[in-house]
Structures are given as structure tokens and as C-alpha cells.
Image: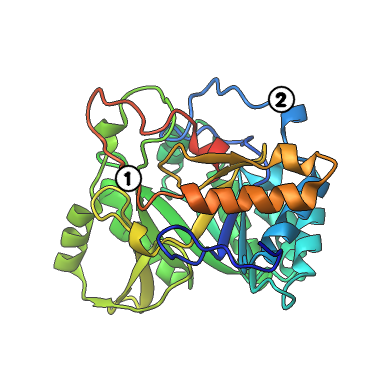
């Protein structure tokens, strides 16, 4: 198979979107994502910035047109802006979009450099505007820094989309206000069902809030007009007529969105997961560090296409445990 052959899986889906984790580390400890005493990977196991760049170029050569940098928290990775800048040079030369997902705590520091690299839009995770609840959920008192970061991103010309995990009995009542705030600031917002990945303290099911119920409540308040707007990910959008803003829903549990999947994920250690909710994995680190990286990487990507499943099988119920033992911060959010 030639280097230029596109990535097409066994279900004839064209894979064009890479979510690349640059670190498993994070400066928050969100309760639904990881335990307080999270054990992070040894640095020797994590791909260098040069390896991450080389890997990205290999994916672009195989038809990946969109790369999202994730973590953990990508902006805690030392010198990550060098990687963002290097990848930005591929925009218009095989790469159509470069973006990232961040918790926003260091965004004020880096927003201008991110925009200068050619990034046009970013996702910022923000579940609440209540400082006490933010501290409870993230185990850190950093809401002010996140809001400063969002403001700095907007000032730098970046299009910001807010990502909020819907949490029963925690931010459930606040969601309409959070949507109104985001739209008033000129930001899109997407609501996400909690995903059963990795062990956490307590039972996720206690705070699982199906978005079908959230949408029913919102439709009693507002007019939600269906939208065909897409960003390449699993979010399905409506326009809130009363606010004029765009609202997305990501529903891994109530409405499986796998039929049109165009995504693969690579961890900071170079493990390619063909599905967020599956265990199907191909190692890319060994090929990268071999004497014949180009051919071995090509073969590994072909294998990833062969094993990519049709869909995930998430379920969330008391005592069921996580769908996969690895944490979202390891997989890449």
C-alpha cells in the first residue's frame, strides 16, 4: 500500500480526523475524569515533540486533514507551542484544520501564539460558572483563570466552543444559564454525557444525566431549530432561536453516533486507539523508534483500519465499572 493511500476502515469509512494527545498530565483533577491521586505516566514513556510531529506528518500523508491536540491538558506540556507552530506550517499543505481542546487554565498565556500558528478555533472545557462548584468538580480553585483564558482567546481572534459535561444534581440546574452565558459571549456550546472511562472515586452513574432529558427541558424553555452544521466530530447541533447561538449534543450513551465515525485517537505514548470506547489498539511508538519508521508506521496504520470496530458499546449502571480501564486523560479527550 502506498504512502498516499487514504485511511479507510473495514466499514468503508474515510478516516480524516486525528485526535492526538500530547500529554496525560493535567493541572485539574475533575472528579468524573480521574482520581485526586492520579498516577501519571513516566516521562520516558511519552512521545517527544519531535516524534509527535513526525507521527502527525505520517498521518497527513495518509489523508488526515484535521488534527486536534488533546491531553490531559495540552498546554501544560513544555514547549507544546513549538509543536503547534510546526503543525501550523502544514495548513493548506494537506492539513485543513489544526485545533485543540483545553481546560483554559493556561490559555491567557498562550492564546496569541496559538492564533499566530494558524489555529482558528478551540474547545474549552467548562462545566460551571459557579466558583464553589468549579472547585468541587475540578478539586482546584481556578475558575478565574479559565474565564481569563476564554476572554484572551476571544481577544486573539480564536473561535471558542465551550464543552460542558452534564452532571445530574451538580450542574443540572445551571445548564440553561451556562448556555445563555456562552451565547451572550459569542461562543458555541456543546453538552456532553459523562463517559465511563477509567476508575474514579464514587459511581459515575450517580451523576449520569441523559441528554434526552436535558433537551426535553430546554425545549420547554426555548425553540431549538435543527442545524446541519458540523465540525467533523460527533456533536449534533441546534440553533437556539431565542439566543441566536449554536448548541451541540454529544450522546455516547443515549444515541450512539458511530455510523459516520471519521476519527482515531493516539495517546501521548503512541498507542493508536481505533475507538474511544474499545480496546482495539495498535502501537505506533515502536515503529516510530525503529530503523524503518516509514514502512512500519504505514503497516501499523493499515492494521488500525482493519481492526477499527463498527461502534462502541458504552453502558453506565451501578456496579458495572468503566467501559475501559484507561482514563480519558490517557486516551486523549
Figure check: 18 above or below 50: below
Disc 2 element:
loop
Q: Position of residue 4 (x, y in %)?
A: 69, 68
Q: Which mark is residue 171?
A: 1
How many numbered marks are there? 2
* 14 relative position to 59: left or right: left
Q: How has the structure been colored for display? A: rainbow
Residue occupying image coordinates x 60% and y 63%: 151
Q: Position of residue 287 (x, y in %)?
A: 74, 42
Q: Is residue 201 visible?
A: yes
Figure check: 151 above or below 128: below
Figure check: 217 above or below 146: below
Residue occupying image coordinates x 36% and y 30%: 322
Q: Position of residue 87 (x, y in %)?
A: 76, 62
* 249 relative position to 150: left or right: left
Residue 53, picture quadrant: bottom right
Disc 2 target residue: 42
Number of residues whose C-alpha sits closer than 10 Å to that of mark 1, classed few (under 14), some (14–19) or many (20 or more): many
Residue occupying image coordinates x 62% and y 56%: 149
Disc 1 element:
loop
Q: Position of residue 285 (x, y in %)?
A: 71, 39
Alpha-carbon span between mark 1 and mark 2: 34 Å
Amino acid at each position: 500500500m502506498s504512502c498516499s493511500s487514504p485511511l479507510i476502515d473495514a466499514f468503508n469509512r474515510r478516516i480524516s480526523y486525528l485526535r492526538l494527545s500530547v500529554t496525560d498530565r493535567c493541572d485539574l483533577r475533575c472528579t468524573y475524569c480521574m482520581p485526586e491521586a492520579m498516577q501519571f505516566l513516566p516521562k520516558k514513556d511519552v512521545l517527544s515533540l519531535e516524534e509527535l510531529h513526525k507521527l502527525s506528518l505520517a498521518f497527513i500523508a495518509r489523508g488526515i486533514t484535521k488534527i486536534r491536540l488533546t491531553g490531559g491538558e495540552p498546554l501544560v506540556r513544555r514547549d507544546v507551542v513549538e509543536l503547534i507552530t510546526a503543525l501550523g506550517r502544514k495548513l493548506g499543505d494537506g492539513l485543513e484544520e489544526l485545533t485543540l481542546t483545553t481546560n483554559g487554565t493556561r490559555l491567557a498565556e498562550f492564546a496569541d501564539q496559538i492564533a499566530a500558528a494558524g489555529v482558528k478555533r478551540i474547545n474549552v472545557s467548562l462545566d460551571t460558572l459557579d466558583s464553589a462548584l468549579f472547585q468541587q468538580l475540578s478539586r482546584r480553585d481556578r475558575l478565574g483563570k479559565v474565564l481569563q483564558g476564554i476572554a484572551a482567546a476571544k481577544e486573539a481572534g480564536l473561535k471558542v466552543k465551550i464543552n460542558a459535561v452534564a452532571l445530574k444534581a451538580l450542574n443540572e440546574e445551571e445548564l440553561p444559564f451556562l448556555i445563555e452565558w456562552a451565547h451572550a459571549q459569542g461562543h458555541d456550546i456543546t453538552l456532553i454525557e459523562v463517559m465511563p472511562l477509567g476508575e474514579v472515586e464514587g459511581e459515575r452513574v450517580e451523576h449520569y444525566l441523559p441528554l434526552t432529558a436535558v433537551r426535553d427541558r430546554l425545549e420547554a424553555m426555548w425553540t431549538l431549530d435543527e442545524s446541519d452544521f458540523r465540525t467533523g466530530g460527533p456533536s449534533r447541533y441546534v440553533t437556539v432561536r431565542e439566543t441566536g447561538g449554536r448548541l451541540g449534543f454529544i450522546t455516547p450513551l443515549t444515541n450512539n453516533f458511530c455510523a459516520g465515525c471519521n476519527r482515531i485517537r493516539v495517546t501521548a505514548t503512541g498507542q493508536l486507539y481505533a475507538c474511544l470506547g474499545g480496546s482495539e489498539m495498535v502501537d505506533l511508538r515502536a515503529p516510530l523508534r525503529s530503523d524503518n519508521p516509514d514502512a512500519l508506521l504505514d503497516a501499523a496504520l493499515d492494521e488500525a483500519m482493519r481492526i477499527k470496530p463498527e461502534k462502541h458499546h458504552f453502558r453506565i449502571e451501578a456496579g458495572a465499572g468503566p467501559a475501559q480501564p484507561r482514563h480519558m486523560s490517557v486516551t486523549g479527550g
